[in-house]
Amino acid sequence: MSEVAAAPTPTIGFIGLGRMGSPMARLLAEGGHRVLGYDLSPEALAQLAGAGGTAVRSAGEAAAADVVVLMLPDSTVVTAVLRDDAVVSALTPGRIVIDMSSSEPVRTRQLAAELAQRGVHLVDAPVSGGVRGAQTGKLTIMVGGDTEIVDRVEPVLKLLGRPVRAGDVGAGHAVKALNNLMSATHLWVTSEAMVAGQRFGLDPEVMLSVFNGSSGRSGSTDNKWPNFILPGSYDSGFGLRLMLKDMKIATALARAVGVEPVLGDEAVELWSHAADDLAATADHTEVARWIASTALPPSDANTARTEGETA
């Protein structure tokens, strides 16, 4: 009885070798895939070559792979790459594109329809877990797309973390944006509470212990404050402006389906103020430091409270 031949391991083109994309491409190479990586940074290309991947000179060369992974800043860049003449020529019928960027779900569906006309499949698979999750292969991956196509790329995604099927194409990007709106709102109110508690004289470690054993627990109390804010490193690996971008995607999505994002809009406004003051490269956890720095000094706060009571 003859044995059934195993399916060939797909070649992967990886476009976007930034802080997230670089370790993800490395994991795919270590997982046995031939990875053709492209980035504008020569240093990123050299790093991929040192990790066992193949650095290529253009997005078009990377797009000639069986599966093409995009890890880019936003929908505008994703669209520009996928409409590049060399990429269009390379994406022959049957190819699969996985957009792991934090893109806009409506534009993702438009791109999927555009690619489908040429016989190319699009899966959206944004991630959560930051640089640390990318380095360790422990990302949460929110996947949207045709079930048959998702089945085919799931072994690739499992090398990077835990794929969660969100629904049809665009669903992954939608749930990612909504998740980050929640995450940002949690972080803001947690930071206000932590700053207020410390001014009252509470030990921040004690506060976090109580919150994490109570109903105030969130990713901010469990991860961001103890690991990036209290130590003063502010290096979670996810930029403040990227968080703000995702928040705006989420509120626009809510409004488009008839939900008025009252608290979401307020959160966007607050984060926008912080973004105006902080450096362009600021990590999103730096909003905690910004909140602390912009709070009234205790003496001024007492004066303001007294004036309010006597008005």
Image (spheres, grey):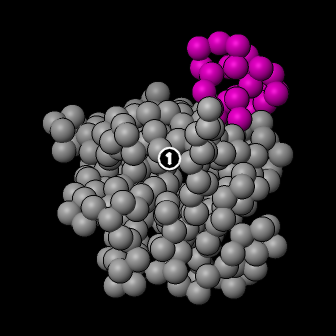
The quarter of the displayed image where residue 159 is located: top right
Question: Compared to 61, does 227 lie above or below?
Answer: above
State the quadrant of the N terminus: top right
Magenta-drawn stretch contains 219? yes
Range covered by the magenta-colored residues: 196-223
The quarter of the displayed image where residue 33 is located: bottom right
Q: In this view, does 24 lie to the left or right of 231?
A: left
Residue 200 appears in the rendering: no
Where residue 130 appears, x then y in whole percent? 65, 49
Magenta-drawn stretch contains 205? yes
Residue underneath mark 1:
153
Residue visible at 77% across and 36% down in the picture: 226
Question: Compared to 243, does 35 lie above or below?
Answer: below
Residue visible at 35% across and 44% down in the picture: 145
Residue nearest the viewer, comparing 14 with 136? 14
Residue 142 appears in the rendering: yes
Residue visible at 34% across and 56% down in the picture: 121
The amino acid on which the numbered mark 1 sits, given as a three-letter code, is Val
Where residue 32 appears, x then y in whole percent? 72, 55
Mark 1, Cα crowd under 10 Å, few <14 / some 14-19 / many 20+, is some
